[in-house]
Image (tube, coloured by chain):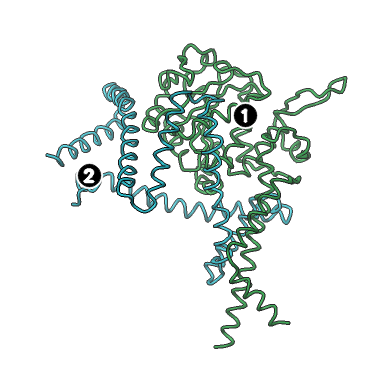
Chain colours: A green, B cyan
C-alpha cells in the first residue's frame, strides 16, 4: 500500500506540464462562466482612495485626474478599477480628467470612459474632460507645468477644444484644485507623479496597479506619499463594492420604486452589507468581483500544486536516502 | 569632434539642469520654459525615428529571408494597416481603428499576460521545493500572501490576511528600501560620472 502511494507521488512528480495547464485553464474558466458569491473584504488603501474622491462630491473647485499608463496586456486587472472610479465620479457629480502618455493606452482610456458613461447623463467639457494622448517625452514637463496652470500644460482637450473655454475648467487652475491623481499602471510609472506632483506641489497621488507591482508601492503607501492604492483585481473588486454600497446605493421611495440614494462612507455599513452577484445587472460593474472568483480558485490550485510537488519531492528524497 | 561635441552638450546641459533645480531665479525658470517648447517640438521626431528603425530592421529581415521572416511581414503589414485605418477613419468610438483595438490588440495583449498564470502554476509545481531553510521560508510566505489576496484567506483565519500584510509591510519593505537606496546611490554615482565625462559608454563605439 505504501509503495502504491509512493508510486503515485513519483508519477505526479513527472507529470506532463500540459495537464497542469489544463487544470489551471479549467480553474480559471469555470468560475468566470459560473460566477459564485464570495465576500469582498475592503482594505484601508482602497478605502482611502474612495474617501478622498468622495470628498470632492459636488464641488466645482475640485477634480480628479486619472492617468492611464498601461496597455491591453494588463487590462484584466486595471480596466475594472478604472471603470469603478469613473462610475464613482459620474454618480457623485465629481469632476474628472483623463490623460495618457503611451499610445496604446489611448483606446483603453476612451473605452473606459464609454463604458462608465453608460446610464449617466454626463457631458464632455462639463462633467469630465479627456486630455487625450500626450507623448511620453513631454510627460515630466506636463506634470510640472500642471503645478502652475493646467490649461497651459495641456492647452487642448482630445476633441481639440481649448481648455480655457471649457466650463469644467472655470474653477480649476492647478494641483490645488485637481487635488488627486490616480495613476493606473503595470509598471513603476506612479513614481514620477510622486516625485514631481507630490513632492514639488503637494498633490495627492494614488495608484491603481497590477498585483505584481503592488509590493513595490507599499513603500510609498507607508510613508504617506501615496494616498491610497488599488492592488490588482483585489483592489478593483474592493472599489467596485464600495461604489455599489455607497455611491450607487438605491432605496425604495413611497411607491416602492428604487431611487438613487447615495450615502457617505461608513465601516459599519460595509461590515453588514452583502451584495449578491445576481443583484448587479450590468456585468461591467462586477467584472473584478467575478474575476476574484477565478483568482481564488487559481490561487488555491497553485497552493495545491506546491504542496503536492513538495510531498512528492520529500517522498523521492526519502526513498533515495534509504537506497544510499 | 564626433565624440567631443555630444560630450560637451551632455556636460553643459546636465549642469544647467542641476543648477535649475537648486536656483529658483527667473532666468532659470525662463530657461526651463524654453526647454519645454523644444521638447514638444522634438518629441514627434522620436516617433518618426522609431517607425524608421522598425521599417529598417524588418525590411532587412524580409530581404535576407532570415528564419521566421514571415513574422516581419505581419509586423509591417499591421503597422501600415493600423496606421492607415486610424488616419482614414479616425480613432473615435465606432471606427474601424477601435474595432481593431477591441478585437485584435485587446485579446492578444490579455492572452500574452494571462500566459503568466500557466507558467507560474507549472513552475510552482515543478520547481518550488522546500530544499533549504530559506526556500521553506519563501514557500510559506508565498502561500500566506497568496491566501491573503483572496477572500477565502480570511474565511480560513483572520491571521492569514494580517500575516500577509505584515510580510508585505515589514520584510518586503525592508528589502525594497535597501534595494532602492542602493539603486539611488548607484544612479547618483553614474550621473556624476556622466556629467564629469568619465562615463562615455552611452555614446557607443567601445571605449
Is label 1 in a helix, a strand or a loop?
Answer: helix
A136 sits left or right of B160 in the view: left
> Which is more foreground, mark 2 or mark 1?
1
Q: How many marks?
A: 2
**Quarter of the image where one finds residue A7:** bottom right
Mark linked to residue A115: 1
Circle 2: element type: helix
Query: Is A180 in front, or is A66?
Result: A66
Farthest residue toward the left?
A: B1
For disc 2, the neighbor class at 10 Å (few under 14, some 14 to 19, many from 20) is few
Q: Residue at x 30, y 28 (%)?
A: B42
Horizontal side of A56 relative to B69 (left or right) equals right
Q: What chain does badge 1 belong to?
A: A
Eyeballing the image, is B156 above or below B107?
Answer: below
- Pointer 2 with pointer 1, Cβ within 8 A: no
| Residue bearing the label numbered 2 | B203
Q: Position of residue B57 (x, y in %)?
A: 32, 44
Q: Is residue A295 left or right of residue B104?
A: right
C-alpha separation, residue under disc 2 versus residue under disc 1: 47 Å
Residue B41 at x, y percent in the picture: 31, 25
**Residue A324: image x %, image y %?**
54, 88
Farthest residue to the right: give it: A255
Q: Report in which chain the residue with disc 2 lies.
A: B
User: Above or below — where is A323 with respect to A93?
Assistant: below
Name the foreground residue: B205 vs A242.
B205
Could you say which disc has been placed on residue A160 in the image?
none
Depicted A143 relative to depicted A299: above or below:
above
Q: Position of residue B23 (x, y in %)?
A: 29, 29
Amino acid at each position: 500500500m505504501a509503495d502504491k502511494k509512493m508510486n503515485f507521488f513519483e508519477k505526479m512528480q513527472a507529470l506532463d506540464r500540459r495537464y497542469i495547464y489544463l487544470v489551471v485553464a479549467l480553474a480559471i474558466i469555470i468560475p468566470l462562466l459560473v460566477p459564485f458569491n464570495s465576500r469582498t473584504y475592503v482594505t484601508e488603501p482602497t478605502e482611502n482612495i474612495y474617501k478622498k474622491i468622495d470628498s470632492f462630491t459636488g464641488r466645482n473647485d475640485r477634480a480628479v485626474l486619472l492617468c492611464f499608463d498601461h496597455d491591453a496586456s494588463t487590462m484584466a486587472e486595471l480596466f475594472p478599477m478604472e471603470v469603478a472610479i469613473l462610475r464613482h465620479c459620474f454618480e457623485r457629480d465629481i469632476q474628472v480628467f483623463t490623460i495618457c502618455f503611451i499610445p496604446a493606452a489611448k483606446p483603453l482610456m476612451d473605452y473606459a470612459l464609454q463604458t462608465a458613461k453608460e446610464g449617466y447623463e454626463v457631458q464632455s467639457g462639463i462633467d469630465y474632460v479627456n486630455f487625450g494622448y500626450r507623448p511620453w517625452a513631454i510627460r515630466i514637463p506636463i506634470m510640472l507645468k500642471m503645478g502652475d496652470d493646467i490649461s497651459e500644460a495641456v492647452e487642448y482637450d482630445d476633441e481639440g477644444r481649448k481648455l480655457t473655454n471649457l466650463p469644467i475648467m472655470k474653477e480649476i487652475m492647478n494641483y490645488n484644485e485637481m487635488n488627486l491623481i490616480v495613476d493606473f499602471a503595470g509598471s513603476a510609472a506612479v513614481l514620477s507623479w510622486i516625485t514631481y506632483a507630490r513632492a514639488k506641489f503637494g498633490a495627492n497621488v494614488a495608484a491603481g496597479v497590477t498585483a505584481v507591482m503592488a509590493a513595490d508601492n507599499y513603500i510609498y503607501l507607508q510613508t504617506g506619499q501615496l494616498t491610497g492604492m488599488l492592488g490588482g483585481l483585489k483592489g478593483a473588486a474592493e472599489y467596485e463594492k464600495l461604489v455599489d454600497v455607497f455611491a450607487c446605493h438605491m432605496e425604495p421611495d413611497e411607491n416602492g420604486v428604487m431611487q438613487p440614494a447615495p450615502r457617505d462612507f461608513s465601516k459599519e455599513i460595509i461590515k453588514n452589507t452583502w451584495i449578491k452577484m445576481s443583484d448587479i445587472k450590468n456585468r461591467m460593474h462586477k467584472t473584478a468581483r467575478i474575476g476574484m472568483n477565478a483568482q481564488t480558485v487559481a490561487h488555491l490550485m497553485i497552493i495545491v500544486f506546491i504542496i503536492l510537488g513538495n510531498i512528492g519531492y520529500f517522498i523521492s528524497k526519502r526513498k533515495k536516502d534509504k537506497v544510499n | 569632434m564626433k565624440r567631443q561635441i555630444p560630450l560637451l552638450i551632455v556636460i553643459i546641459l546636465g549642469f544647467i539642469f542641476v543648477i535649475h533645480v537648486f536656483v529658483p531665479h527667473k532666468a532659470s525658470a525662463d530657461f526651463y520654459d524654453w526647454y519645454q517648447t523644444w521638447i514638444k517640438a522634438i518629441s514627434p521626431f522620436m516617433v518618426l525615428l522609431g517607425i524608421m528603425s522598425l521599417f529598417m530592421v524588418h525590411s532587412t529581415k524580409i530581404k535576407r529571408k532570415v528564419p521566421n521572416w514571415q513574422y516581419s511581414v505581419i509586423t509591417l503589414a499591421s503597422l501600415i494597416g493600423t496606421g492607415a485605418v486610424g488616419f482614414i477613419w479616425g480613432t473615435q468610438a465606432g471606427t474601424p481603428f477601435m474595432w481593431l483595438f477591441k478585437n485584435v490588440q485587446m485579446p492578444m495583449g490579455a492572452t500574452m499576460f494571462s500566459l503568466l498564470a500557466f507558467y507560474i502554476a507549472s513552475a510552482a509545481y515543478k520547481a518550488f521545493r522546500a530544499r533549504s531553510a530559506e526556500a521553506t521560508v519563501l514557500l510559506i510566505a508565498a502561500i500566506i500572501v497568496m491566501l491573503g489576496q483572496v477572500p477565502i484567506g480570511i474565511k480560513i483565519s483572520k491571521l492569514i490576511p494580517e500575516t500577509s500584510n505584515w510580510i508585505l509591510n515589514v520584510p518586503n519593505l525592508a528589502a525594497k528600501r535597501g534595494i532602492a537606496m542602493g539603486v539611488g546611490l548607484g544612479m547618483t554615482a553614474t550621473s556624476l560620472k556622466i556629467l564629469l565625462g568619465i562615463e562615455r559608454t552611452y555614446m557607443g563605439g567601445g571605449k
